[in-house]
Amino acid sequence: MSKLIGLLSIFVLFSLASCSQVLKAEHDEIAVVKPSLSEDKVAVRIGFIGKWLSKQSTKGGGSREAIINRFEDGQYIIEIKIFNSSGVLTTIQKEFGFWGVSGGVYFTIHRGWIADDQLYSSDPSDAYHYDSYDIIEISNNKLKYQSLSGGDTYTYLKIN
């Protein structure tokens, strides 16, 4: 019986030690406030501002041309043109929304469409209107990023 009590005591001690490790992991200390951004992180966001052009092939033999203008205040306007495999323009769509950069991720929040000089709002509760991208490359004249949801990689060249 005393052997059983001894084994049970050891089991309880190990269990309590494991619990304290789990509790410690769940209660890691955090910063009181968000730390300031380094100059290079600020520069990444600034690098996205301006007018950018992308011309890329699409699956099925067509192509996509997009011009996006990202403004310093976090808003964007993009015009997308889709061409079929014969080079015929099939779709023109103009959209607007918000954009940002954080922790190596570029993100957009689609707020609506522009047609006939009218704004048409999108549904903000629709998850489809939120996109995030892993930033692959950034320079003064080139941006390259990959969609975290769809996997497509987009390449843009600065045009102003």
Image (cartoon, grey):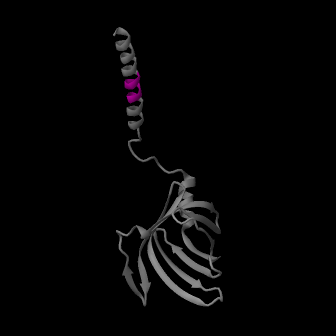
Image height of 113 relative to 106, above or below? below
Quadrant (top left/top right/bottom left/bottom right) for the N terminus = top left
Q: Quadrant of residue 122?
A: bottom left
- Residue 50, given in percent of the width and then of the height, sits at 55, 72
**Magenta includes 17?**
yes
Specify start and end residues of the magenta stretch as a single range. Answer: 14-20
Q: Give the side of residue 99 with respect to residue 65, left or right.
A: left
Residue that sits furthest to the top in the current view: 2
**What residue lies at 42% left-to-right and 30% top-to-bottom?**
21
Answer yes or no: is residue 39 visible.
Answer: yes
**Magenta includes 98?**
no
Return the residue nearer the eye: 85 or 137: 85
- Residue 142, given in percent of the width and then of the height, sits at 64, 68
**What residue lies at 41% left-to-right and 41% top-to-bottom?**
31
- Residue 51, given in percent of the width and then of the height, sits at 57, 75
- Residue 97, given in percent of the width and then of the height, sits at 43, 73
Please tell me whether the stretch drawn in magenta is mainly helix, strand or loop. Answer: helix
Answer yes or no: is residue 73 visible.
Answer: no
Return the residue nearer the eye: 6 or 129: 6
Q: Give the side of residue 151 with respect to residue 141, left or right.
A: left
Return the residue nearer the eye: 98 or 88: 88
Q: Quadrant of residue 14?
A: top left
Quadrant (top left/top right/bottom left/bottom right) for the C terminus = bottom right
